[in-house]
Image (cartoon, rainbow, N blue to C red):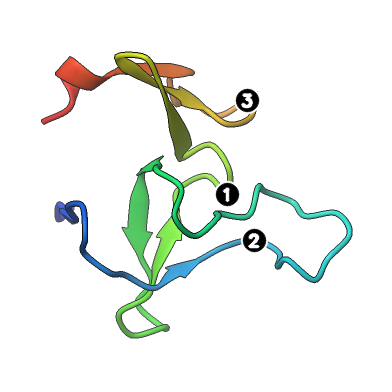
Amino acid sequence: ESSKIQLTSGDEAQIRQLGSSKMSETPAPILEVGKTYLLFLGELSLEGDALWVTGGDAGIFVPEGEAYVQVVDSDDSFPTKVAAGDLK
């Protein structure tokens, strides 16, 4: 059974990522403070309240007009673009 995690603007959450800002190359883009993202997240059972980005980088989207676009080309099954109106 899956649960839905809902965060809204202004909510805070601990997000685990692949890599760190100290690395010269990272396996996935590092999220930037103050930037807007649409994230598809999963819960980490071993890390308490921490969340992880689904698919490493496949679950990271940025706003582009009336939609959100994936930050990287991914071989994952995620769509590369999500219309803001389609989000529930």
The circle drawn on residue 66 is: none
Tags 1 and 2 touching, CB below 8 Å? yes
The N terminus, quarter of image:
bottom left
- Label 3: which residue? 75
Residue 88, percent from left and from top: 10, 31
Q: Is mark 3 on a helix, strand or loop?
A: loop
Location of residue 72 (image quadrant): top right
Residue drawn where x is 18% and y is 27% of the image: 87
Q: Distance between the residues labelled 1 and 2?
A: 6 Å
Q: Which amino acid does label 1 sit on?
A: Gly
The amino acid pointed to by label 3 is Asp
Q: Residue at x 35, y 57 (%)?
A: 42
List x then y, in percent, for residue 3.
14, 56
Q: Give the SS element for disc 1.
A: loop
- Badge 3: residue crowd in 10 Å (few <14, some 14–19, many ≥20): few
Is residue 5 left or right of 59 when viewed as pictured? left
Q: In this view, does 61 lie above or below 30?
A: above
The amino acid type of the residue labelled 2 equals Leu
The residue indicated by pointer 2 is 18
State yes or no: discs 3 and 2 in contact (Cβ < 8 Å): no
Q: Which one is in front, 25 or 52?
A: 25
Mark 3 or mark 1: name the one nearer the start of the chain: 1
Q: Can residue 77 be seen in this view?
A: no
Identify the residue at image location x=46%, y=40%.
59
**Label 1 crowd bin: few (<14), some (14–19), many (20+), radius 10 Å:** some
Of the residues tagged 3 and 2, which is closer to the observer? 2
Residue 37 appears at what percent x and percent y? 40, 42
Is residue 30 in view from this perspective? Answer: yes
Q: Mark 1 points at which residue?
A: 56
Q: Earlier in the sequence, mark 3 or mark 2?
A: 2
SS type, badge 2: loop
